[in-house]
Each structure stands twice: as structure tokens, then as C-alpha cells.
Image (spheres, helix red, strand yellow):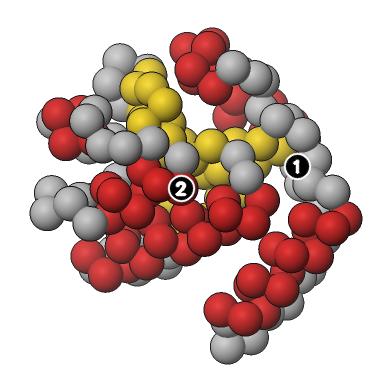
């Protein structure tokens, strides 16, 4: 079963100190925590996912070099809220910009929220801060794309 995913785009690798803070956050929030691949990713996959996003890069003001994905493997409303709030908590520690795919008709819902940095990809992607994610999660029409 798949569920919602949010992406935190980063302009550079995380420092060892920030990685330590991130690990501490995950340990504190989790009933168990296991890091199988510390800091290792698939560069080819990352490049392919970011290859045709010039509009996103223009809004971000940088070309992402790293990303952190926050996903839920369930699809209830509470799972969407938890995913958004967890992503905001992670961003408080590591920084970055949240990238979320939008459902059809969601632009009017998100456009006026605090922390929105821009909307890209023909109104299918919103980029924002942790403040944006918290505001959106509290909106009655909030829903992430599954």
C-alpha cells in the first residue's frame, strides 16, 4: 500500500553535526530506528528525478544536490497530516525546501498560505517552508497526493 510522500530539497550535503541532530530527532520520534545506508543514495535516480525541473530550480534559487523523502505507507487523513508535520520537524533540523505534488484544484488552497515560496510545473508542485507545511496541514482542505 502506498501513501503520501513529501520531498525536502537540499542545496548541499548535510554536515556531520546536522546529520547527528537528524538522527537524534528520528530516534526521539521513533519506536525503533535503523539506518541502513548512512548518507548513501542512488545518484542516477536523483538526477533522473530532477532532470526536467527548471521551473522548480528557478523557484528554489538553487539546483538540488540532495533530498530527503518523508513517506507514509498508509493513506488515511491522519497519515497525511503526520507526514506533513514530520516533514516540517525534519526541516526544522536540516533546513531545505519542501516540494509537494498537488491534487487538481489545490492551488487556491495553498497559494495564500504562509511560507509558500512558489508554485511550479503547471500548478502541480508547491514549494515551501516548514511554516507552510504546518499551515497547510491545519487547513480543512488539506490532502497530500498519494
In the drawing, what numbered circle is on residue 130?
2
* Residue 23 image position (x, y, % from top left): 73, 69
133 sits to left or right of 19: left
Between tags 2 and 1, which lies in front? 2
43 sits to left or right of 122: right
Q: Helix or strand or loop: what does disc 1 sit on?
A: loop
Answer few, some or many: residues within 10 Å of disc 1's Cα (few below 14, many 20 plus, some between 14 and 19).
few
| Residue plotted at (18% across, 51% down) | 139
Vertical placement of residue 139 versus 113, above or below: below
| Residue plotted at (52% across, 60% down) | 89
Residue 2 visible in rendering: no
| Residue plotted at (43% across, 31% down) | 127
Q: Residue furthest bottom?
A: 31
* Residue 68 image position (x, y, % from top left): 62, 48
* Labels in figure, total: 2
Give how far apart the Cα atoms at labels 2 and 1 are: 26 Å
Residue 99 visible in rendering: yes
Q: Helix or strand or loop: what does disc 2 sit on?
A: helix
In the rendered image, which residue does mark 1 sit on?
42
Q: Quadrant of the N terminus?
A: bottom left
* Residue 62 image position (x, y, % from top left): 65, 19
The answer to which of 94 and 76 lies nearer the viewer is 94
In the drawing, what numbered circle is on residue 109?
none
Picture quadrant of residue 123: top left
Picture quadrant of residue 119: top left
Amino acid at each position: 500500500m502506498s501513501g503520501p510522500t513529501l520531498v525536502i530539497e537540499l542545496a548541499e550535503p548535510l554536515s556531520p553535526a546536522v546529520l547527528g541532530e537528524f538522527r537524534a530527532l528520528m530516534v526521539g520520534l521513533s519506536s525503533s530506528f535503523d539506518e541502513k545506508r548512512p548518507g548513501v543514495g542512488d545518484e542516477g535516480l536523483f538526477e533522473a528525478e530532477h532532470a526536467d525541473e527548471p521551473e522548480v530550480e528557478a523557484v528554489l534559487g538553487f539546483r538540488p544536490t540532495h533530498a530527503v523523502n518523508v513517506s507514509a505507507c498508509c493513506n488515511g487523513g491522519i497519515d497525511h497530516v503526520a507526514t506533513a508535520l514530520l516533514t516540517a520537524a525534519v526541516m526544522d533540523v536540516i533546513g531545505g525546501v519542501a516540494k509537494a505534488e498537488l491534487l487538481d484544484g489545490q492551488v487556491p488552497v495553498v497559494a495564500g498560505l504562509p511560507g509558500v515560496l512558489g508554485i511550479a510545473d503547471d500548478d502541480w508542485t508547491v514549494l515551501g517552508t516548514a511554516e507552510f507545511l504546518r499551515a497547510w496541514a491545519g487547513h480543512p482542505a488539506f490532502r497530500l497526493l498519494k
